[in-house]
Image (cartoon, rainbow, N blue to C red):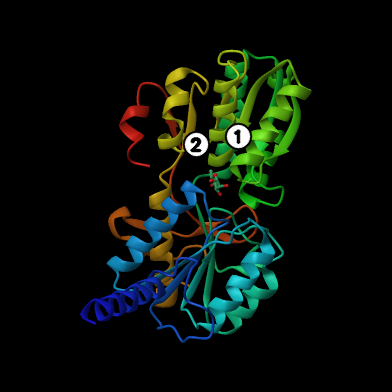
């Protein structure tokens, strides 16, 4: 009897923990949340980059005495995120941080949320300016595009076929970076670099593997794959390594050091870039409380303090909205990758 009681008590504690942390398992709609409950909706489950962003967000909210609700749909679609946001509106959360699966499609549900006093901002993958108060941008978007073209040019030796392996075709962060890559590639100094295809692995491991294989099959002379997604670059690194193509086809892009260390060391990916995804989420948590606490409205010029990261000022974003910029991207290469692979 005592054992049964213990199990019951344990189950109740676990249910309480799940309700607090959100996860995707508990916390259905309808319950009233406190004014200090802040939600984070990522693109999809099973993405280690997203998990790190969420852990930074949760740590930041907790350190400010609030409650974090973490959500992500099984597949990276706007429809699934719309359902989640409807639930969060019913739960009366104070703020929602959205990593958008579409730039425009979430506008009706996000404006509905804002109409009910919920502070909405995007992070990582932006939603359109009418759907948000501000956006937390991990790094300057143009700089990312330019840097990745410079890297591809360097690895290709100034000429030949290159391809891009992206996330979903609707991902606004990847699409913006790709637009800047195309603008850069149009410059005369890249006249001998030929972008043959933009493929979409949807930030799903298996699809990213099969899209890489299809690229290799269709373009036997391919020299470089740029993957501006951590899921895509890790999948491409694996395919290149498994097929013995190290040195023939080179990978670069945006990757997690923990997933890419072996490919950077082997030369499959001579170098790549990223920022600290834990810090992106942590910065988001301070945007949440600055908005709900009335310290900022999301307008350009607003300043706030972001805990251990210091002070930030909101600036005008290229899309006509506003944004908060975390900082410059960092280059990972053989000489430093071992220092970072256990950090994120
Ligand atoms: C993937 C996601 C995410 C992006 C990183 C670089 O994990 O698409 O949105 O910022 O890559």
Q: Is mark 1 within 8 Å of ligand 1?
A: no
Q: Residue 164 in the image: x percent, y percent?
A: 67, 33
Q: How many labels were placed on the picture?
A: 2
Examine the rendering and report whether any part of residue 57 can be seen: yes
Residue behind mark 2: 255
Q: Quadrant of residue 252?
A: top right
Q: Which residue is mark 1?
A: 227
Give the position of the N terminus as an image quadrant: bottom left
Circle 2 Cα neighbour tier, 10 Å, few/some/many (<14 / 14–19 / ≥20): many
Q: Which residue lies at the image location 41% right of the left edge and 76% below the top edge?
A: 37
Q: Is mark 2 within 8 Å of ligand 1?
A: yes
Callout 1: SS? strand
Label 2 with label 1: CB-CB less than 8 Å: yes
Q: Position of residue 336 (x, y in %)?
A: 35, 26
Depth check, front residue: 103 or 85 = 85
The quadrant holding residue 335 is top left
* Disc on res. 57: none
Between the residue at mark 2 and the residue at mark 1, the CA separation in whole angstroms equals: 8 Å
Where residue 216 appears, x then y in whole percent?
71, 23
> Is residue 209 placed above or below 318 in the rendered structure?
above
């Amino acid at each position: 009897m005592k054992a049964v009681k213990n199990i019951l008590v344990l189950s109740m504690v676990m249910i309480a923990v799940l309700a607090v942390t959100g996860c995707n398992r508990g916390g259905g709609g309808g319950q009233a949340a406190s004014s200090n409950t802040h939600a984070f909706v990522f693109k999809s489950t099973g993405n280690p980059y997203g998990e790190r962003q969420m852990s930074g967000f949760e740590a930041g909210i907790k350190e400010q005495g609030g409650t974090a609700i973490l959500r992500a749909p099984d597949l990276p679609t706007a429809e699934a995120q719309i359902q989640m946001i409807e639930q969060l509106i019913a739960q009366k959360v104070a703020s929602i941080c959205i990593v958008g699966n579409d730039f425009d499609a979430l506008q009706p549900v996000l404006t509905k949320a804002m109409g009910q006093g919920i502070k909405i901002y995007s992070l990582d993958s932006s939603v359109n300016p009418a759907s948000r108060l501000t956006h937390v941008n991990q790094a300057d978007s143009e700089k990312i595009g330019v840097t990745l073209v410079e890297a591809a040019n360097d690895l290709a030796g100034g000429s030949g076929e290159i391809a891009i392996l992206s996330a979903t075709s609707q991902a606004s962060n990847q699409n913006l970076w790709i637009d800047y890559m195309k603008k850069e590639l149009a410059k005369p100094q890249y006249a001998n670099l030929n972008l043959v295809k933009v493929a979409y692995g949807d930030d799903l491991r298996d699809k990213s593997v099969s899209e890489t294989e299809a690229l290799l099959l269709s373009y036997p002379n391919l020299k470089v794959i740029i993957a501006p997604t951590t899921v895509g670059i890790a999948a491409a690194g694996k395919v290149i390594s498994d097929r013995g193509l190290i040195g023939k086809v080179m990978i670069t892009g945006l990757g997690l050091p923990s997933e890419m260390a072996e490919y950077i060391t082997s030369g499959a990916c001579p170098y790549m870039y990223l920022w600290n995804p834990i810090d992106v989420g942590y910065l988001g948590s301070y945007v949440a409380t600055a908005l709900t606490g009335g310290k900022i409205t999301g307008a350009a010029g607003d300043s706030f303090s972001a805990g251990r990261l210091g002070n930030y000022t909101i600036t005008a974003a290229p899309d006509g909205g506003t944004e908060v910029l975390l900082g410059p991207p960092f280059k990972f290469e053989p000489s430093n990758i071992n220092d970072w692979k256990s950090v994120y």
